[in-house]
Amino acid sequence: MADRLPLTGADCFLRAFDDEIRRRCGSSHNSQLVLELGPGFDGERLRKTLDEVARAQPILRAPIRRGAFSPPAYRLDLAPRSPLPPVALHELEEDAPDDAVREVCFRRLNETLSGRDGRLLRFDAIRRGDRTDLVMTWLHMLLDGSGSEAFVRWLDEVGGGMRSPADLPPDEAPDGPVDRSGQPLGARERGDRAMRWQASMKSLGDLPTRSLAGPLRTERQALGYQVRGFDHGESAAIVETAKQRAGFLTPMLYYLAAALRAHDAVFRMRGARPPSYVVPLPVNLRPKGSEKAIFRTRVSLIWFQVEGEQLDDPDGLLDELKRQRRDAIKAGLVEAGTAAMDYARWAPQRVYARMARRGLAGELCSFFFAFTGEFLADQPTFFGAPIVRGYHAAPVPPSPGSSLAMSLHGGRLNATHVTQANVLTPDEQACFWTTLCAELVAPGGAG
Amino acid sequence: MSASSSSGGSGDWTRETLAEKVCEILREELLEVDDGFGPSSNLVESGLDSLAVTQLMLSLEESTGIWLDESLLTPEVLETADTLAACLLEELSRG
């Protein structure tokens, strides 16, 4: 096994924002996956399994270091000196309210994990009688959304004796950007593509935008979230409409349109609609469920920009999002994004974060959005307990200050709205959810 | 809008040649598939995802002049290269 595993360009892109949060807000760029489990969860077995897995897969506690002339890398050789990822068991009263569980979730989301010290991952199992909320929190660059689900599935298989802790195919994907057929790009092509992406990013600044948090907040990070789970009937209707309107394999645009209209409703409530909305949509660059690359992030971004008036017509908005996505893919901006992110492996973190904000006058975007599709589709249980519900909580830098992550589990649609404290008033939060729900059920229904 | 055509007409395309074109694009540019991949292979099971389907439609637009709106891409249409070819041919024949 190699002593070092380089971070991908996308990892370093995220690392730049981790650095920004660390400096400005005293925390780190943490992501969270939550499984609501029924009876039968075996926490001790999880702890034992995670210990075995972390010993067999050193990346889970490897310090991240930058060499004098090399990009940041996981120092696998130093991993044995770092502590094993912890599994904390919390016992609450059987009738403890959901807020008591959320308090643990939010505390972990706002704690500092550290790439430098190899503290990258932790679990919390919160018991209430025979129910357990299992919370996995990690430094976002270790796993992307798809990778985190693959990791949970693999952990369960190891815990169930179906695989050994070492039984994980090596990540053999090239570290740098590749062309459409998977071949590494030459230096010139890489530079050309990065310039093309930078030009497209720069053009976003032609129309001013503003996030709900306003540009650059510097107080201590205090992320929290609300989760809305739609029932089976509502979910089935929404999912079917999304597929019919936006396409069987591309329903995310339908959900993004609803999210845009929900944010717009809040801005209109404030009486200050921004001239444009700018939202990046992550593009997973590996097949969902792939076993080949659980760790490190493999994503690019497609950027959307819509003017305020375009949100007044829901059908026109969806057509506009389709057009922008198609044009971006046609222009090769997905591949260009990976080439641009590759430069983040070499640039100092602060420079990169500053460059990203400069184009939009201090903002990164209007909000972050992700639709991760079916959540652990073929996994009904985790360490002996049925999975009742599962969802992601996506991290968000101090501005834009809010993110919306949507996914499906067991036929139910879930939406997690993560916000920095005080970004939304209770009335604004209520307006956001009312509009989002109405727009998902019937676009334009919120007025 | 359901579909748009820049050149129009079905030209020399048949369902068979369209299906073979779909397979050729997927094999050579977009998916890692084995030699057994053909017009009746299941596309989603072969790895067709949200990005690949749009790249496929863009390549087909270059070849045929027809752009299929995402709302036409149902599970039935995207089942195999052959079913997709049937949908494309129908749109081509409409001009």
Image: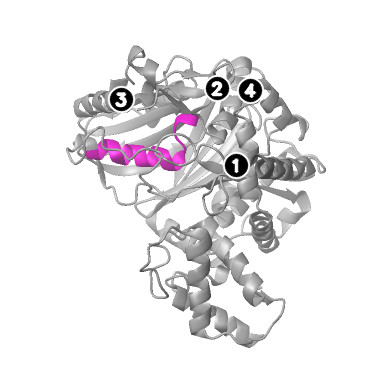
Q: Is residue A11 above or below residue A108?
A: below
Q: Residues within 10 Å of mark 1 (few under 14, many from 20)?
A: many
**Kind of residue sitting beneath label 4:** Gln
Mark found first going from the N terminus, 2 or 3: 3
**Tag 3, which secondary structure?**
helix
Q: CA distance from mark 4 to mark 3?
A: 28 Å
Q: Main secondary structure of the magenta part?
A: helix
**Tag 4, which secondary structure?**
helix
Pinpoint residue A132: horizontal percent, then vertical percent. Answer: 28, 32
The magenta span reads A140-157
- The residue under the point 76% across, 39% down is A209
Would you say the residues marked 4 and 3 are in contact, meaning their CB atoms lie under 8 Å apart? no
In the foreground, A162 or B69: A162
Would you say the residues marked 1 and 2 are in contact, meaning their CB atoms lie under 8 Å apart? no
Q: CA distance from mark 2 to mark 3?
A: 29 Å
Labels in figure, total: 4
> Which residue corresponds to mark 2?
A222
Q: Residues within 10 Å of mark 4 (few under 14, many from 20)?
A: some
Q: Is residue A342 visible?
A: yes
**Kind of residue sitting beneath label 1:** Thr
> Which residue corresponds to mark 4?
A349
